[in-house]
């Protein structure tokens, strides 16, 4: 009989990366975006995805604040990983989700994200355009109010919260519609035309995490 292997010590730091990636998603909004990505995470069973709304006291939730928060979290986890000798603590990918809306800090946010290796996805005019693409095409230049009116045709009494009947499984169809609206808006850290959204990039990142189980 071969000698019995001693159990591995649980307190021993490890420098070996586990197969599953760890993602951080920081959202400008505190309701719709967070609910949506939590459901996508559950849909793909991608448990190591850390979804947070951006709550920065005194800074608001404009694109620059979202990116700054994400960079701080990314750097904090990297320092913790080095200190503990455990690469699994650090985030593999960091995503930020923002709107164009009437913000004046988007250009700053885009530049900061590029420098820091953060993936910034942008919806014009708002994230609700991505929600609308789960129901229909829309390619006409618009504002937030127009998108909401279109969305209310599909969701009764829409109040930014997603009902339990929301068709989360139509994410691939929504991605097709988004790519038709702006074929060039297919990578992070750029501003698309009106209307446009590349939120499908985040969905695909979460899906890839789910596949690595």
Image (cartoon, rainbow, N blue to C red):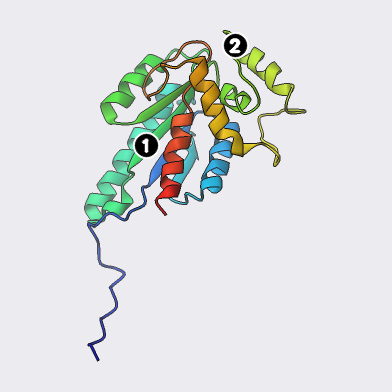
The answer to whether residue 181 of the structure is visible from this angle is yes
- Neighbours of disc 2 within 10 Å: few (<14), some (14-19), many (20+): some
Residue 143 shows which numbered tag?
Answer: 2
Q: Quadrant of residue 69?
A: top left
Q: Which element carries disc 2, helix, strand or loop?
A: loop
Q: Where residue 172 sits in the image (x, y, percent)? A: 54, 33
Above or below, 53 against 11 in this view is above
Q: Where residue 126 sits in the image (x, y, percent)? A: 55, 20
Q: Where residue 81 sits in the image (x, y, percent)? A: 27, 51
Name the outermost residue toward the right: 156
Q: Earlier in the sequence, mark 1 or mark 2?
A: 1
Residue at 32% of width from left, 43% of height from top?
92
Name the outermost residue toward the top: 141
Residue at 48% of width from left, 28% of height from top?
199
Q: Is 97 in front, or is 40? A: 40
- Which quarter of the rendered picture does the C terminus lie within? bottom left
Above or below, 194 against 208 in this view is above
- Neighbours of disc 1 within 10 Å: few (<14), some (14-19), many (20+): many
What residue is pinned by disc 1?
A: 94
Above or below, 5 against 11 in this view is below
Residue at 48% of width from left, 41% of height from top?
51
The answer to whether residue 31 of the structure is visible from this angle is no
Q: Where residue 148 sits in the image (x, y, percent)? A: 67, 19
Alpha carbon distance from label 1 to label 2:
28 Å
């Amino acid at each position: 009989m071969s000698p019995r292997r001693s159990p591995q010590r649980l307190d021993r730091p490890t420098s070996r990366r586990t197969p599953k990636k760890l993602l951080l998603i920081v959202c400008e909004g505190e309701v719709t975006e967070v609910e949506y990505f939590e459901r996508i995470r559950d849909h793909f069973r991608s448990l190591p995805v850390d979804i947070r709304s951006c709550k920065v006291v005194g800074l608001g939730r404009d694109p620059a604040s979202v990116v700054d928060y994400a960079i701080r979290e990314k750097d904090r986890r990297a320092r913790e990983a080095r200190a503990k000798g455990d690469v699994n603590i650090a985030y593999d990918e960091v995503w930020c989700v923002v709107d164009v809306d009437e913000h004046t800090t988007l250009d700053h946010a885009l530049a900061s994200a590029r420098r820091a290796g953060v993936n910034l996805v942008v919806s014009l005019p708002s994230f609700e355009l991505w929600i609308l693409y789960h129901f229909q095409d829309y390619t006409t230049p618009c504002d937030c109010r127009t998108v909401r009116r279109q969305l209310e045709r599909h969701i009764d009494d829409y109040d930014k919260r997603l009902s339990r009947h929301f068709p989360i499984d139509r994410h691939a169809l929504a991605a097709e519609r988004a790519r038709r609206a702006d074929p060039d808006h297919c990578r992070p850290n750029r501003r698309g035309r009106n209307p446009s959204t590349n939120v499908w990039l985040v969905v695909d990142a979460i899906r890839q995490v789910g596949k690595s189980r």
